[in-house]
Amino acid sequence: MDRSRLEAFSDGVFAVAITLLALNLTVEGPGLQHQLYEHRWSFAAYLLSFFIIGIIWVNHHVLIRSIALVDRTLLFLNLVLLLFVVLIPFSTTTVAQYLPVGGEDVKVAMAMYSAVFLGMSAGFGSIFEWTLHGDHRIVPLPPQAHWPARLRFVGGSSVYAVAIVVSLFNAITAFILMALIAVYYIVERTPTAPAASDSPGGGARVDGSQQDK
Amino acid sequence: MDRSRLEAFSDGVFAVAITLLALNLTVEGPGLQHQLYEHRWSFAAYLLSFFIIGIIWVNHHVLIRSIALVDRTLLFLNLVLLLFVVLIPFSTTTVAQYLPVGGEDVKVAMAMYSAVFLGMSAGFGSIFEWTLHGDHRIVPLPPQAHWPARLRFVGGSSVYAVAIVVSLFNAITAFILMALIAVYYIVERTPTAPAASDSPGGGARVDGSQQDK
Amino acid sequence: MDRSRLEAFSDGVFAVAITLLALNLTVEGPGLQHQLYEHRWSFAAYLLSFFIIGIIWVNHHVLIRSIALVDRTLLFLNLVLLLFVVLIPFSTTTVAQYLPVGGEDVKVAMAMYSAVFLGMSAGFGSIFEWTLHGDHRIVPLPPQAHWPARLRFVGGSSVYAVAIVVSLFNAITAFILMALIAVYYIVERTPTAPAASDSPGGGARVDGSQQDK
Amino acid sequence: MDRSRLEAFSDGVFAVAITLLALNLTVEGPGLQHQLYEHRWSFAAYLLSFFIIGIIWVNHHVLIRSIALVDRTLLFLNLVLLLFVVLIPFSTTTVAQYLPVGGEDVKVAMAMYSAVFLGMSAGFGSIFEWTLHGDHRIVPLPPQAHWPARLRFVGGSSVYAVAIVVSLFNAITAFILMALIAVYYIVERTPTAPAASDSPGGGARVDGSQQDK
């Protein structure tokens, strides 16, 4: 079994999930301008979810390319990741729906929204953990680099765990927290996945020689 | 005609179907926590269908890679498989809708849910049967291995047939039965498709030499 | 520009369109068994549209593989084909909605249903016509084979034109006519696209040598 | 990181977005013929959006093939482009919904419709700008060609900016303006992306030698 179909299927799921995000943006009846204003949280949630899916897609990309071996364990860990990716349009719509309402419900909605991202992050982390064992990586990571790399992952994931807790006090603060982290990941130069060593400068030339490295 | 477009199209259908599963998860109005609890069967059905599609995708993957020849018969057998895959979001939503209601309807819904999986399984089995004939496989299966392989398939499919019958007595038992089988398939090490001989250890190294084996 | 992205994009559209077909299958409220019976036309329309999309996908597959050159004209002709493919879930839902109602509306719905397939068929035919000119085919078709090939196409398309006319008298007859044609295309051995000469026996071995033929 | 997954993911998003366009075409109740007439603007908006997505897909195709290097900046610029592509089904449905209503709302809807295309165009332009720097292109564009190429882009994008302004006075004029531009782009022979030099005549032969050019 080769990497290409794993990538194709995952890309398909990422692409459909990211496109379905916008499916719940709907307006109806007179007063469009006012309605668009009323839906401002829907647009904000759409934007945030879009970029979080985008970031995880970029990192998934880098991580899968570092893999030498595709086995059933990897396929099922990848399914766990996708299980949460597929839930994102639902959790996004839910949070967008309860944000203008406020009260107890918006806290539950935001906690669920964060929890779906935490699940996605854990799924991604489990794939990363899998790459550290056996001869799963093309270029093995030196053992002394395992723990720093793991800590970076736990660091990233823990933001979503923090966001769950914050949600229960103030949903909007949790939302802003996640937005800041997303901006940080987009702006920072070093890839989350420690495949940086494979492609110095964060880029890889597209030439045959690189293809099967 | 080459394998790649057959795979690309199938992966597309699998990816869209698996993502649409979550499209019918919706909550509305006040009391989110209570609503999520009320929808627990929707989440359970989502989870089960997600992993059954995931398992069939993994097996489809392994089976198609063992194929030497793509002809029109294969393409149409594959369409029959996909016909049932596409119906899964519908049957999942229906079963999730009637599970909290109970009564006669939930039995019909669960029988239909199992029947769609039986159809999918039969479609998959027909592709497998096709691979046993002519020079359809890259590495032909020795004739004495045909019947044991077929029996494994019939064994797998018959679970869904049993589930249809069980549904008519107790829908929830049928649901749990299918869930146990899904867990079994995820945990077991040997691939359902007898391509195990192609890739000992259940994994395949990603290097050019394997590419066209 | 290479064939692969044209294929990937088309396969994506085919896959999404074929999966969306089932999105409008919905049941609600008590009496599931009765409801499924009431929706029998929805299932029949789903089945027919599924296989017609499947057939056109198979033929698209064969036709694109015979092409040597991808230019902007081809890309836009392909867009015209996809324009109608994308309309199929809409026309299918519409026809399924009006079939149980009957009267004048079902005739209009069925005529529209047939017209969308006629448009798809015309889009496909225009791609085929394009392949007959210049050095667009890998293996040029001898000029004396142009007209017979065209006639086969016009023959196939004219079924949909006939179905439009028949719809205006009896919608169900038109539906059965299209179903018979779909069965004929699935059962017949010779591909519609005259690429048969490329792959005798209707199949092609998956080996590198065939890859770039 | 190679071009292929960037293309696969983008193609997936384009394909899903273009297919979802038709998801909001729905009719209900008696009087189908009258209803189809009532929905004429929905069909017109569907048609326009379909071809604008199609044009941007073709140009995306040509632009990405001219790229030598895939880095994180490119991936995120591409995400910005896709962010707006994903919004197109929403803006299309909205404009189709308010066109028969008229008044202030249709102007807002049409301005938003144009703004989404302007955003898409700006995202595309930013990818193009990125290709002009460093060694991002396989065949570098001579510096004296940078400004003319940029001007062509700004020229194309400015149509959507003009359409926003026109929308505020007359929505239908803005709609017709965008339709004329779409027709112009489909009919014109020179690709928008200045990759024309790579493939004289606007076409590229599908042979191995071209593959990695």
Image (cartoon, coloured by chain):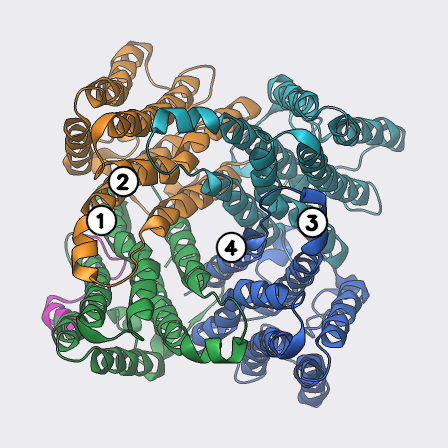
Chain colours: A blue, B green, C orange, D cyan
User: Crowding at label 4, few (<14), some or many (≥20) Cα neighbours within 10 Å?
Assistant: many
| Mark 4, residue position | A16
Are labels 4 and 1 on one chain? no
Q: Which is in the foreground here, disc 4 or disc 1? A: 1
Mark 2–mark 1 contact, CB under 8 Å? yes
Tag 4, which chain? A
Where A171 sits versus C7, above or below? Answer: below
> Number of marks in the image?
4
Q: Mark 3 sits on what residue?
A: A36
Q: Which residues are magenta?
A: B135-150
Q: Which residue is mark 1?
A: C39
Q: Residues within 10 Å of mark 2 (few under 14, many from 20)?
A: many
Position of D168 with respect to B126 (left or right) is right
Question: Where residue C101 sits in the image (x, y, percent)?
Answer: 23, 36
Q: Amino acid at mark 1?
A: His
Residue B2: image quadrant is: top left
Callouts 3 and 2 on one subunit: no
Q: Is residue D205 magenta?
A: no
